[in-house]
Amino acid sequence: MRPDNRNPDQMRPVQIFRHYTKHAEGSVLIECGDTKIICTASVNEKVPQFLKGKGQGWLTAEYNMLPCSTGERMQREVIKGRQSGRTMEIQRLIGRALRSVVDMKKLGERTIQIDCDVIQADGGTRTASITGAFVALHDAVDKLLCKQLIEHTPILDHIAAISVGIHKGAAVLDLDYQEDSSCDTDMNVVMTGSLGLVEVQGTAEGIAFSREELNIMLDKAQQGIKELVAIQKTVLAVS
Amino acid sequence: MRPDNRNPDQMRPVQIFRHYTKHAEGSVLIECGDTKIICTASVNEKVPQFLKGKGQGWLTAEYNMLPCSTGERMQREVIKGRQSGRTMEIQRLIGRALRSVVDMKKLGERTIQIDCDVIQADGGTRTASITGAFVALHDAVDKLLCKQLIEHTPILDHIAAISVGIHKGAAVLDLDYQEDSSCDTDMNVVMTGSLGLVEVQGTAEGIAFSREELNIMLDKAQQGIKELVAIQKTVLAVS
Amino acid sequence: MRPDNRNPDQMRPVQIFRHYTKHAEGSVLIECGDTKIICTASVNEKVPQFLKGKGQGWLTAEYNMLPCSTGERMQREVIKGRQSGRTMEIQRLIGRALRSVVDMKKLGERTIQIDCDVIQADGGTRTASITGAFVALHDAVDKLLCKQLIEHTPILDHIAAISVGIHKGAAVLDLDYQEDSSCDTDMNVVMTGSLGLVEVQGTAEGIAFSREELNIMLDKAQQGIKELVAIQKTVLAVS
Amino acid sequence: MRPDNRNPDQMRPVQIFRHYTKHAEGSVLIECGDTKIICTASVNEKVPQFLKGKGQGWLTAEYNMLPCSTGERMQREVIKGRQSGRTMEIQRLIGRALRSVVDMKKLGERTIQIDCDVIQADGGTRTASITGAFVALHDAVDKLLCKQLIEHTPILDHIAAISVGIHKGAAVLDLDYQEDSSCDTDMNVVMTGSLGLVEVQGTAEGIAFSREELNIMLDKAQQGIKELVAIQKTVLAVS
Amino acid sequence: MRPDNRNPDQMRPVQIFRHYTKHAEGSVLIECGDTKIICTASVNEKVPQFLKGKGQGWLTAEYNMLPCSTGERMQREVIKGRQSGRTMEIQRLIGRALRSVVDMKKLGERTIQIDCDVIQADGGTRTASITGAFVALHDAVDKLLCKQLIEHTPILDHIAAISVGIHKGAAVLDLDYQEDSSCDTDMNVVMTGSLGLVEVQGTAEGIAFSREELNIMLDKAQQGIKELVAIQKTVLAVS
Amino acid sequence: MRPDNRNPDQMRPVQIFRHYTKHAEGSVLIECGDTKIICTASVNEKVPQFLKGKGQGWLTAEYNMLPCSTGERMQREVIKGRQSGRTMEIQRLIGRALRSVVDMKKLGERTIQIDCDVIQADGGTRTASITGAFVALHDAVDKLLCKQLIEHTPILDHIAAISVGIHKGAAVLDLDYQEDSSCDTDMNVVMTGSLGLVEVQGTAEGIAFSREELNIMLDKAQQGIKELVAIQKTVLAVS
C-alpha cells in the first residue's frame, strides 16, 4: 500500500485554475494533491541576442520555491546570491519541454517567459510545473491570436509530465514527497499529447534499476500523461 | 473622484484567509483590492549570532514580488544576484513594525521568520504585508502556546499599516497602483491597535507637502488602521 | 540634560568647507559636531537608459562609510560584495531629497552624481549628507552655468535635513550617536528652503509615539532646518 | 554514414592514463576520440556539515571546461561569478553516478572530491568524466587501503557512462560534437559493471522519440558500457 | 624639466597629520603634493583562523579610492560587487610592506587592520599609503603599550615607500599622475629605516629598461626614502 | 645544497610542447620540472570598448590553477564567486609582459586572449606561464600571417621570465615550491630576448635584501632567461 492509500496507477487529484492572477498573459494555479504551483506565461516583444533578426521566437522558463513551501523553511536563493543547481536543472527542463511543442517561426520575434512559483510543495513540482505551464502558455498564445499579433497558433501539441518510481519494490505513479524521499528509483517523464517521448530522466537513488523496471515505469507514466492531457483539454475547453 | 470611484476615506475591500498553506506555523493570504500577498510566519529554534545566550528571541522579515505580480514582468532578484534597495527597505520596515509589538524576552531564544510574497500587486504591498503578517505571526505564536513552548504570549498589541497620500490635491486613503504612481505625496503609516504611531514615512513625489496636509493624512490613516485592526480581530476570533 | 549638555533645541556646530577636493565639480566637507562627511557632486554628460532622448537630466546619490568612521571598525561592503539595506535606504533618501529641488528639464540630458563618504560618524550622517550635498550640487551647477552648458539654474530651492527624536521622554533636536542609540523615537525630516516637507521618516525604536509628540518633533525640526538653510546661504555667498 | 565514418555501434577510441598528475590521490587523463579530460579524486578527512558524526563518508564532484577546450573560446565561469546551469547539472550527475557504487559506511568519515577538468572537448564530456573519474576514484581508494585508513574497499561495482542518440533517423553510439549538435535525440546512460541502470537521461532535441527508439538506444548504450568497463578493468589491472 | 618644475631628485611636499579621525587607534592624513590619503590602524583582539592558538598576531591592509578622488569619477567597487585587480594588488603590497617591520610574536594574538582610503589622487597613492600607514600603525601600537596590553613594541624599524621612474629618458623621483601616465618605466620601492629593500616593483610601460637605469632609479628611491623616514620621525616625535 | 641537488645557477629541465590542444590558435604545454601549464593563445576579431575604432589590437591574459594542481586541493575560485588577489596579480603580470613585445598597431583591431591553466604546480607558475604563453602567442600570430589577416608580425622580441631568490643566505635560480615557501627573498624577473628588463618584482619574505643581493639575483635571472629564450627559439624552429 502507498502512504496515502492510492493504487500504484493512481495519480493524486489534479486541478487547474486559469486566470489566477491578472497581469500575465497566461496565469494558472495547478494543484496536484498538496503540490500547488502558480504558472504564468508572459509575452515580451523581444528575443535574446542570439536570435535577433532570425525571424523566430523563443521560450524560456524560471522556477522558484517560496521559502515556506516546504516542510522546513528554505533560504531564499537571492540571499545566497545565486540559484542552486537543482533550480537551474528544473527550469532548464521546463523550458526544453515546452519548446518541444512550439513552432518558433510561427511565434515570431517574441519571447514567452514561463514562471513557475511553487506555493506549496509535496513532491512532483517539476512535472506539475510543465503540465500547468502548458495551460498558461496556451492562454498567452490565445491572447496573441486574439490581438492578431500572430495568425496561426505556434503550439504543435499538448505537453505534460509526471513522475514515476520504484517504491518498496513496486512501480508507482505520481510520487508524493514521502514516497519520493524513500524510493529506489525516481523517474520524470515528459510526453506530448500524441504520446511521443520528450524527456526521460530516471535516477537510481538506491539500487540500480533494470530494463524491465524501466519499461513498467514508462507504461505507467504514459497512462498518467494521457489523463493529464485530458484534464488540460477539459480546462481549456472553457472559453 | 478616485479612479475606482472610492470615497477619499474608503479603503479597498480587505480579506484575510488563514491557514493558506500547510507547512509554516502561520500562513495567511491577504487581499486588499487586487493586491494579494502570502504572509507566513515560521518558527526557528535558533537566534542570530548577536543574540545567542541573551535569553531573548528575534523576528525578521523578507519581502519578495513574484515576477508576474506586476503589470510588466519584473526580473527575479536572484538573477541579478542581489535584492534591490526597494526590497531591502520594505523588508526592514516589515521587520521593525512587527518587532514593535513583540516582547522578545517572552518569545524566548527562537526566531520568527516572516515571509511576504506578493502574488499580485496593485499598490500598498508593504502595508498589506504588515497587516497580513501580523495575523500569521499570531497563528505561529498560538502554536507555540499550544505546544507549551512558551507560557505567555509575547504579542503586546495589534499592528497594522495603511498608505495615504495627496492625489490631485486631495488627501486619499489606501492608494492603488494607479493613484500611487501619479500622487504628489505618498505616506505609509504603521500603528498599533491602541493607535500609537510606530512608523510614519511620508515622501513628496512632486511638490512638497505642508504640516496641514500631513495632519489630514494622519487622520485618515488612523481611521483606516482602526478598520484593519477590527478585521484582524474578526479573523482571529475564529479558532 | 543631554549627554553633551546641549539644550533640546540646540544643534551641534555645523561647518561646511567648499572646494574640499579638486576633481569633482562640487566638493564639500560638512561637519556637524563630530560627524564629518565628504559630499561631492560630479557631472556626467549621459543619462540612464530609461531617460535617453527625453530631454531631461537625472540626479543620483551614493553613500558610504569609511571602515574606521565608526567606533568599532565596520567591514567594507565590497568585501561582502553588496551594499547593506541601510546603505541603500540612505542613498535612496539622499537622491530623492535632492531631486525634489532640481528641475530635470532645465538640467538637460546629463546626470549629477552625488557621493557622500562618511569620514567620521557620530549620528545624523544621512541628514548631514543631504545638507552638505546640496552645497556641492550648487557648486556643480554653478560650473555648468559658468561653462554656459545650461542657461538657467535647475535648482528650485534649498534643501536641508535634520534628525529629531524622543530621548528620555523629551523631544530633542539633532541626535548624536549616543542619543540615537538610546532614544525611543528617531525621526529624520527633510525640508525645502521655503519649509515644505519633502520627507518625514519617524520610527518608534521603543514605545510608540503620539500625534502630539510628532508635532513637537516637527516644530523642532523646522527650526533646525531654518538654521541649516541660513548656513548654506552664508557659505554659498562667498564666491 | 557517420561524419567520422564510424559504424552506428562503434565508439571512438578510448585511452585512460593513470597517475597523470602527482598531487591528487587519484589522477587520470581520459581520452575518448578528441575529448580529453583530467579526472582527479582527492581525499579530505572531513565530511559536510549534514553528515558529521554519522559514521559515513561522502563523494562530491565538480566539472569545468578550460576556456580553450571548445571551438570558440568560452568565458571562464569565475569571470561571471557563478557556474552555469549546464555545469551544475553535469557535476551533479557525475556525483550521483559515482556515489551509486560507493558504500559510504565503508568509506568512513571522509570526503572524496572528484574534479573533472575538460582539456579538449569534442562531445560526450559528461559521460567520459564519469568513466574516467571511476578509475581515479579506484586509485584514491587503493591509497586509503594501502595506508590502512580503511579495511575493505567501499567500491561496490564499476560505473561507466556513454551517450547514444538518434542522428539522421538512425540510432548511433557515442556522439561526437558534430553529431551531438545536429541529432534529434540525445541520451546519456550510466550503468554499473553488472549492467544495472543508474541514470537514463534522454532528451528530444527535435522531434519526440518513441518507446522503440528508446529501446534500441539502450541496447547500444549497454554494449558501449560493457566495452568501457572492460577498458577500466584492463587499465586498473596494472599495479 | 618636469611638469611641475621639480628637480629629478625632488619629492613633492609631504605632510602627515596624526589623530585625524577619532575612532581608530591610529589615524593619519598623509598629503604628498595633491595626493591625500586617510590611513588608519585599528586593533582587533582576534587573529585569522589560520593563526589561532599560535601565540602571534597579524596585520592586514585594505585600500580604496573614493569615487571622486580621481579626475574622472570612478565607479565604486561595491557596485560591481568585487575589488579590482589593481586594488587587491595594492592592498596586498601595503600589508606585506608593513608586516615586514612587525614582530608578530610581540604583537600577541591580535590583528592590526590598516585602511588606506584615498581622498584625492595625484599619483603615488600606494607608496604614500605605506608611508602614512606606518605612522598610524605606530600610534596604534603606542595605545597598546599605554594600556599595557603589550610589553615591548613589536615595531622593528621604520618603513616607507616612494615611486621612481624613467620619464622622457630621465630618472625622476616621486611621479605625479601626469608623469606616471606618460613614463616609460614606473618603479615602486619600499625600504626600511635602515635602508634594507623590502619590495622592488619595476615595470616597463613602454620600452624595456636597463640594469644601469635600474640602479639610478634605486639610488633616487633610497634618497627619497631617507627623507620620508626623517619626516615620519619628526611627526612621531610630538607626543 | 638545494633540496633537489641543483647548482645555484641551474634551472629545472624545461620542455615546451606545441599544438597541445586543437581548438586554440596557439596551444602549448610547458613543463619546468614538475610545474606543468597549458598556455593557449586565441584570437578574437574584436577589441575591448576603450579601443574601438583606434586601429589597434589588444592582448589580455587569464591565469587559473586546477583544484588538484597543488599539494592540498584548492577550492575553485568560481565557487567563491571571484578571483583571488593572487590570481589577478598574476594574470595582470602575464598580460603586461606579453604586451611589452607586441606592436598593437600591427596586430590590427583584434584581441589575443592568453589562457594559462596550471595542471600541476611546483613553484614558478607565473614565470613559466609567461615563457610558455610567448610560444602560444607566436603560433597564433603565425596563423594570422598564414591567413594573411596581418601582413607583418606584430611580435617585436622574445619574452621570458624566471624566478630567483635568496634561500638560506644564497642566491638561487628557479625556485621550486619547497624553496619558494622557505626563502628570504623571492624575485620574478621578466626580460626580452635582447635582455631588456620588463618587470622586476622582488619581495623580502623574511629579512630585507641589499642592493648587492639584488644585483646578484639579477645576474642569475639574466642567465636563466638567455637559456629560456634559446629553448623558445629551438622549439619554434620546427615548423
Image: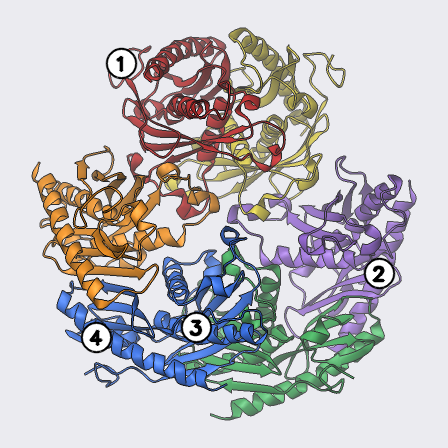
Chain colours: A yellow, B purple, C green, D red, E blue, F orange
Q: Secondary structure at mark 4?
A: helix
Between marks 3 and 1, how big is the CA–CA gap?
69 Å
Q: Quadrant of residue D118?
A: top left
Between marks 1 and 4, how big is the CA–CA gap?
70 Å
Disc 3 marks a residue whose amino acid type is Ala
Disc 1 crowd, CA 10 A, few/some/many (<14, 14-19, 20+): some
Disc 2 marks a residue whose amino acid type is Thr
Q: Secondary structure at mark 2?
A: strand
Q: Kindly report which numbered mark, 4 or 2, lies closer to the viewer in this rendering.
A: 4
Position in image of residue D55 (x %, y %): 60, 27
Residue linked to disc 1: D6
Up-down: is D219 above or below F188? Answer: above
Q: Kindly report which numbered mark, 1 or 4, lies closer to the viewer in this rendering.
A: 4
- The answer to which of A53 and F201 lies nearer the viewer is F201
Residue linked to disc 4: E219
Position in image of residue D74 (x %, y %): 34, 40
Between marks 4 and 2, how big is the CA–CA gap?
74 Å
Label ID, residue E133: 3
Task: First in sequence, mark 4 or 3: give its number.
Answer: 3
Same chain for labels 3 and 2? Say yes or no: no
Position in image of residue D30 (x %, y %): 32, 24
Up-down: is D153 above or below E173? Answer: above
Q: Chain of mark 3?
A: E
Q: Dots 3 and 2: beta carbons under 8 Å?
A: no
Residue linked to disc 2: B192
Q: Secondary structure at mark 3?
A: helix
Q: Is residue F232 visible?
A: yes
Label ID, residue D45: none
